[in-house]
Image (cartoon, rainbow, N blue to C red):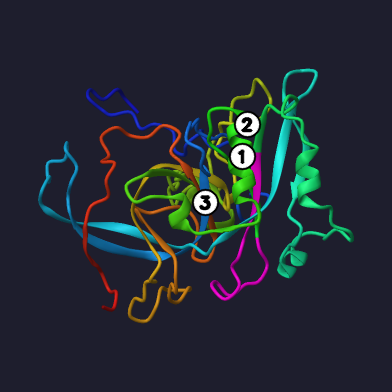
């Protein structure tokens, strides 16, 4: 093929940012990094994905070309049952300077549904006595362990347990706040506010073992090719005699841990959302819910974890707009 002036070079197909493309270990992810917030508060929450809709509101963004006009945007509806604070986890520094779990203090009474997830202790330790033994001089950070209360909401009884960081100026302030919420049930409105930006961490839809055409978008070979059409023609040079990691190969597609940054919370309500016929594969949202602008990873009924945005956009308004209408919702 001769040289063509002005021909655009087609880049390699498939992003190399997500390597390795392996299955997630569990259906809800783990969050390793949290933003630094001086206000004593929980820095995250969790909800179940119900479905998508579209919302009409007056655009209040100062830098938007549609400022002051009525706009219609796609949104995701999250069913947000309450979460319960089960324990406080304390961290110390090891000999190499890394954080290591020092101890945990659990509440006296745990829900019986928690037996479906973990093995319950035969003899529970007293909460007040364990808290009095804590020496804050050894503690460098602390978080809380929470579990969901999905019974009667998403067709399941088995809760999920995960860790949420706490904001605060120092360890003592975090400790006082953690003691005040230990054993309590918190709703979405207690943690998140409309107008805030959150990072969505979730596991994407699983698509199983797929070939290079679907997995990486590789061009389909000619029908007269003598080897294979739905594959890569060349998988590398003769030297070195190995297949590089950059070569598109068949493998797992979907069911990956993914981050979706700076999602704008439009509304946090507690009166439920009942679209005509219910959300597909989910039904209706009975009580607490969260409306997030745009789409998020994962199928319906999957647990979606949220944290306060670690690098929020400055152009997004800090005040949520007044929603005029939610498409398909019964009045």
Q: Residues within 10 Å of mark 1 (few under 14, many from 20)?
A: few
Q: CA distance from mark 2 to mark 1?
A: 6 Å
Residue furthest to the top: 96
Look at the picture and state if 114 lies above or below 284: above
- Point 89% across, 59% down: residue: 123
In the image, residue 287 above or below residue 201: below
For image coordinates 29% across by 22% down, the residue present is 3
Tell me residue 67's x, y (percent). Answer: 12, 45
Q: For this rendering, which residue is in front, 302 or 147?
A: 147
Question: How many residues crowd around disc 3 within 10 Å: few (fewer than 14), some, or many (20 or more)?
Answer: many
Looking at the image, is mark 3 or mark 2 earlier in the sequence? 3
- Looking at the rendered structure, the secondary structure element under dot 1 is helix
| Mark found first going from the N terminus, 3 or 1 | 3
Cβ–Cβ under 8 Å for marks 2 and 1: yes
User: Closer to us: mark 3 or mark 1?
Assistant: 1
Q: Residue at x 53, y 28 (%)?
A: 169
Query: Which residue position holds label 3?
Result: 45
Looking at the rendered image, the quarter that the N terminus falls into is: top left
Q: Identify the residue under disc 1.
A: 176
The answer to whether residue 229 is seen in the rendering is no
């Amino acid at each position: 093929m001769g040289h063509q002036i002005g021909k655009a070079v087609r880049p390699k197909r498939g992003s190399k940012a997500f390597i390795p493309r392996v299955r997630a270990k569990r259906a809800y992810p783990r969050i390793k990094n949290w933003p630094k917030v001086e206000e004593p508060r929980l820095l995250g929450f969790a909800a179940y994905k119900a479905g998508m809709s579209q919302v009409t509101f007056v655009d209040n963004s100062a830098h938007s070309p549609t400022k002051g006009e009525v706009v219609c945007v796609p949104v995701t509806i999250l069913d947000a049952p309450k979460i319960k604070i089960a324990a406080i986890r304390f961290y110390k520094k090891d000999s190499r300077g890394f954080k290591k779990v020092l101890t945990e203090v659990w509440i006296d009474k745990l829900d019986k549904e928690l037996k479906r997830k973990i093995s319950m202790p035969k003899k529970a330790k007293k909460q007040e006595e364990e808290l009095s033994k804590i020496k804050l001089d050894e503690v460098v950070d602390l978080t809380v362990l929470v579990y969901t209360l999905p019974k009667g909401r998403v067709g399941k009884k088995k809760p999920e347990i995960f860790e949420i960081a706490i904001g605060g100026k120092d360890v003592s302030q975090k400790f006082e706040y953690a003691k005040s919420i230990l054993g309590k049930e918190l709703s979405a409105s207690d943690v998140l506010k409309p107008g805030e930006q959150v990072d969505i961490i979730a596991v994407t839809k699983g698509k199983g073992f797929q070939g290079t055409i679907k997995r990486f978008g590789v061009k389909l070979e000619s029908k007269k090719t003598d080897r294979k059409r739905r594959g890569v023609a060349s998988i590398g040079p003769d030297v070195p005699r190995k297949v590089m990691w950059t070569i598109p190969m068949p493998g797992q597609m979907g069911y990956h841990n993914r981050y979706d940054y700076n999602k704008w919370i439009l509304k946090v309500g507690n009166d439920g959302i009942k679209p005509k016929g219910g959300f597909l594969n989910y039904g209706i949202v009975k009580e607490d819910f969260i409306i997030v602008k745009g789409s998020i990873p994962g199928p319906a009924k999957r647990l979606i974890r949220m944290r306060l945005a670690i690098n929020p956009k400055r152009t997004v308004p800090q005040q949520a707009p007044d929603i005029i209408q939610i498409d398909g919702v019964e009045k």
